[in-house]
Image (tube, rainbow, N blue to C red):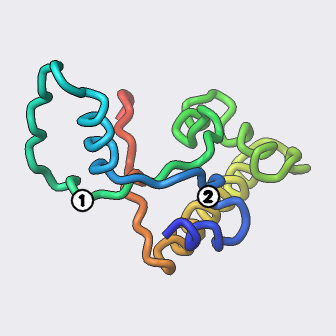
Amino acid sequence: MNERLMRLPGKHAAEFVAAFDESFVDEGAAAVQGAGRPRVAARSKGPLDNAVWLVWKYEGDNTLFDMMESKDFPYNLEPVLLDRELRLPKGTARKGVTIRLVMKQLLGALSAAHSTGIVHRDVKPQVREKD
């Protein structure tokens, strides 16, 4: 699955680091316990018991939500998306160009991931206090 994400065009995904499943972690914890140490209670069975966890390179703290909370939104996205500011006067037209570009990249990345069989579970609306 990681190879699938790495085939996505552009910078739609961070660099892949590793993958593991929780059974590996549980076996390691049991080995570390050793003799004479109290046993850890068995985990309850849940929907993620057979899940494989994927780890990618850390790409920073800023999220689209953080950028949207800024008083400079959507102008603050221009350097991130375009490596420059647009040469349009600030206003509705310039905002429209930037927001269209954000949505095109976001939906394009999701579409590319979906086309490889990957569903990103963390893409969802964020509830803001103002809503």
User: x, y (%) of residue 108?
Assistant: 59, 70
Q: Residue at x 67, y 56 (%)?
A: 96
Q: Is residue 115 placed above or below 77 in the rendered structure?
A: below
Closer to the eye: label 1 or 2: 1
Classify mark 1: residues with Cα within 10 Å, few (<14), some (14-19) or many (20+): few
User: Which amino acid is tagged 2?
Assistant: Ala
User: Which amino acid is tagged 1?
Assistant: Asn
For the C terminus, the image quarter is: top left
Q: Residue at x 40, y 51 (%)?
A: 122
Classify residue 70 as left or right of residue 119.
Answer: right
Q: Residue at x 86, y 48 (%)?
A: 83
Element on which disc 1 rests: loop
Disc number for residue 50: 1
User: x, y (%) of residue 130?
Assistant: 38, 29
Disc number for residue 13: 2
Q: Residue at x 57, y 43 (%)?
A: 64
Q: Nearer the viewer, residue 103 or 33?
A: 33
What is the CA distance from the residue labelled 1 to the residue labelled 2?
24 Å
Classify residue 70 as left or right of residue 110.
Answer: right
Q: Is residue 88 placed above or below 40 in the rendered structure?
A: below
Element on which disc 2 rests: loop
